[in-house]
Image (cartoon, rainbow, N blue to C red):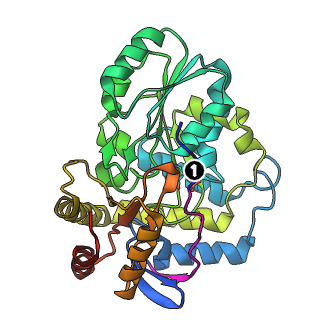
Amino acid sequence: MRDTVPSNTMLRRIAASTSTTLRVNGQDLLSFAGTNLLGLGHHPEVLAAAQECLSRCGLSAAASRSTSGNFAEHENLEEALAEFLGLEAALILPSGWLANEAVMQAYGDELDTVLVDADAHTSLWMSTTLTRAQVIDCGASDLTRTHALLDRHGEQHLALLTDGLFPMQRRIAPLAEFLRLLPRKGILLVDDSHGLGFLGQGGRGSLSGAGVNDPRAVMTGSMAKALGAGGGFIASSTGTIERIRRRADAFVGTTPIPPAVAAGARAALQILEREPERVRRLRAHAARLTAIGKRMIQDDAEGRSPVLALPVSDQAAGRALEQKLAAQGLYIPWTEYGGGPGALRVAVSSEHTTQDLERLEEALLQHYQP
Ligand SMILES: Cc1ncc(COP(=O)(O)O)c(C=O)c1O
């Protein structure tokens, strides 16, 4: 497992935001940061839905869902998520991180072996601390190694944990192949926080992109990215969701996301479904970003991603570069997130304009040295 403590502990303080700008140190900067993929967190319909619910229900659910914290907005969002994703049922959790832990709380007891992609998100790795099963790093979408491991452990109760899209590595997990190799009673846990809104039909995520709909697959994700809201979700078969609802302390013993956030997320989902052109624009911008990457660092990774990691290993150099870009009105953070090597993390949104991307390319060409 990777180092989970990022060394860039200095936080930048944001005073205001739009779908493409952040106010940092009193300056409104064109942002190529974060995961605000489709600008939905600032959409007037999303804000109106959240504000209406806020005035009606208050700021907090103020109780777990099993007592008095289960609002209509939570259930409506779960129905909408399941329907949009083409899966039988969905469950929302206070965060994407807890969604992964909830799956392991529900299944960990009966697992013998857990295979985890080497680059899987820290929350997937952390979820493996909730089971006594043997945990094995199965490499980075390494089918040969995974196949060999499944040959050795395939008769046991087994789960395979992976992200759907690894944005920094610009790699899409081979989900169809994983499902082909997975034993009949195995579980494929796919954290699709980054695939939702980008991959698959109309942004339905990496399972849709792989053309698979299999009851052994459990999809999780953060709603703080493409949906511009907050909280996490799990979507799968009715039986799986029912089991998690009953067994996962992360669900039973926590206060859900505020109803207003659930109302906003549902409105965001409706816009995503109604306006697939947002996803198309995001993909076009991601393709442009890939071309910029090839130009800057001779990167030959072919994978699609709205994120480009430009290596800058030294923190002081990363900060200096951040400042030079800020002087030109751009916000692009340097990060060592997840214990990976330091990099300037460049992220595009569907709401950027062609001119925004031109500004980005010019500034990087001027200031970035591989
Ligand atoms: C792949 C992935 N999974 C899970 C999470 C955690 O989601 P949340 O921030 O909703 O807890 C993140 C985080 O940002 C993420 O990138």
**Chain part drawn in magenta:** 7-18
> Measuring 16% from the left and 63% from the top, which residue is drawn there?
295
Whole-percent x, y for residue 122 in the image: 55, 44
- Above or below residue 264? Residue 19 is below
> Measuring 36% from the left and 80% from the top, which residue is drawn there?
325
Pointer 1 residue Cβ closer than 8 Å to ligand 1: yes
Quadrant of the snapshot with the C terminus? bottom left
**Along the line of sight, which residue is nearer the eye, 289 or 345?**
345
Asked if residue 348 shows in the view, the reply is yes
Identify the amino acid type marked 1: Gly
Quadrant of the snapshot with the N terminus? top right
* Magenta portion: prevailing SS class: loop
Residue 305 sits in quarter:
bottom left
- 254 left or right of 133? right
- Above or below residue 35? Residue 341 is above
Q: Is residue 14 magenta?
A: yes
**Along the line of sight, which residue is nearer the eye, 114 or 294?**
294
Asked if residue 242 shows in the view, the reply is no
Whole-percent x, y for residue 124 in the image: 55, 39
Find the residue positioned furthest to the bottom. 26
**Along the line of sight, which residue is nearer the eye, 168 or 218?**
168
Whole-percent x, y for residue 356 in the image: 27, 80
- Above or below residue 272? Residue 29 is below
> Measuring 63% from the left and 26% from the top, which residue is drawn there?
107
> For numbered disc 1, what is the local secondary structure?
helix
Q: Residues within 10 Å of mark 1 (few under 14, many from 20)?
A: many
The residue beneath circle 1 is 96
Q: Is residue 178 magenta?
A: no
Whole-percent x, y for residue 208 in the image: 34, 42
- 184 left or right of 285? right
Residue 145 sits in quarter:
top left
- 55 left or right of 13? right
